[in-house]
Image (cartoon, rainbow, N blue to C red):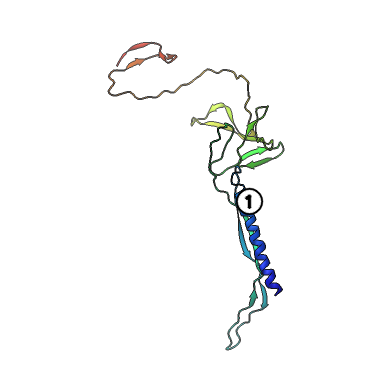
Amino acid sequence: MIDSIYIGITGVQSHQERLTVIGNNVANINTTAFKGSRVAFSEVMSQTISEGTAPRGQIAATNPKQTGLGVGIASIDRIQTQGSLQLTGIDTDLAVQGDGMFVVSDGTRDLYTRDGTFAFDTGGRLVDPSTGLVVKGNIARDDGTNALNEISFEAELKELIVPLNRESEARATTQVQLAGNLDAAGGSAPVWSEDTIFGQPARHEGLN
């Protein structure tokens, strides 16, 4: 009689924990980067009343007699699925689409988060305003692009700093790529042999 009451209590307790997890999922439905959880149940180890027996002569083997002792929680798993992306109108609000995490630091250790609600502090550092942790990332090198015309980045993670209200040294453009299509029905087109100035041809040579 006592065992049956105890077994029933394990079911009530386990399902109460499941309802707690469900309630937490619902309560955080509008929490940025929140990931819901699920509860997995497992049977509690059974109690053996009598062991099984091996076959003896013309008598077949017998199975053991066991009674269950209720149910327990096997695990509470975090569901790492992609959430919906929303526009906030704030330039520093970021999001990760797919796998990956933002790296933030307290100065001594790196932490990981999916919450991209960031802002700039007075020093121009990109930070998490709710915790003060500084966002880190790979900084682009000053040597331009590589052989594949791709921007190269430093391997070490560093604080992301944007120098606000500062003037940077002007650099002259060294290379320009221009592409376009000529209208086949447009007739002859002018040919220019020199650079243009403010969008206008510097010198006109003739027509083709």
Q: Position of residue 94 (x, y in %)?
A: 57, 36
Q: Position of residue 18 (x, y in %)?
A: 63, 58
Quadrant showing the C terminus:
top left
When the figure is inspected, residue 7 is found, relative to residue 75, above or below; the finding is below
Q: Toward the viewer: 115 or 168? A: 115
Residue depicted at 31% across the width and 17% down the height: 189
Residue depicted at 63% across the width and 51% down the height: 24
Quadrant showing the N terminus:
bottom right
- Determine the secondary structure under disc 1: helix
- Amino acid found under the numbered disc labelled 1: Asn
Residue depicted at 56% across the width and 35% down the height: 88
Q: How many marks?
A: 1
Residue labelled with disc 1 = 24
Left or right: 55, with 176 as reference point:
right
Q: Toward the viewer: 185 or 84? A: 84
Residue depicted at 70% across the width and 40% down the height: 109
When the figure is inspected, residue 148 is found, relative to residue 39, above or below; the finding is above
Q: Toward the viewer: 107 or 56? A: 107
The residue sitting at the bottom extreme is 58
**Other residues around mark 1 within 10 Å, as few (<14) / some (14–19) / many (≥20):** few
Question: Which quadrant would residue 103 be assigned to in this image?
Answer: top right
Q: Position of residue 87 (x, y in %)?
A: 53, 36
Q: Position of residue 26 (x, y in %)?
A: 60, 50
Left or right: 97, with 185 as reference point:
right
Question: Which quadrant would residue 192 be assigned to in this image?
Answer: top left
Left or right: 145, with 123 as reference point:
left
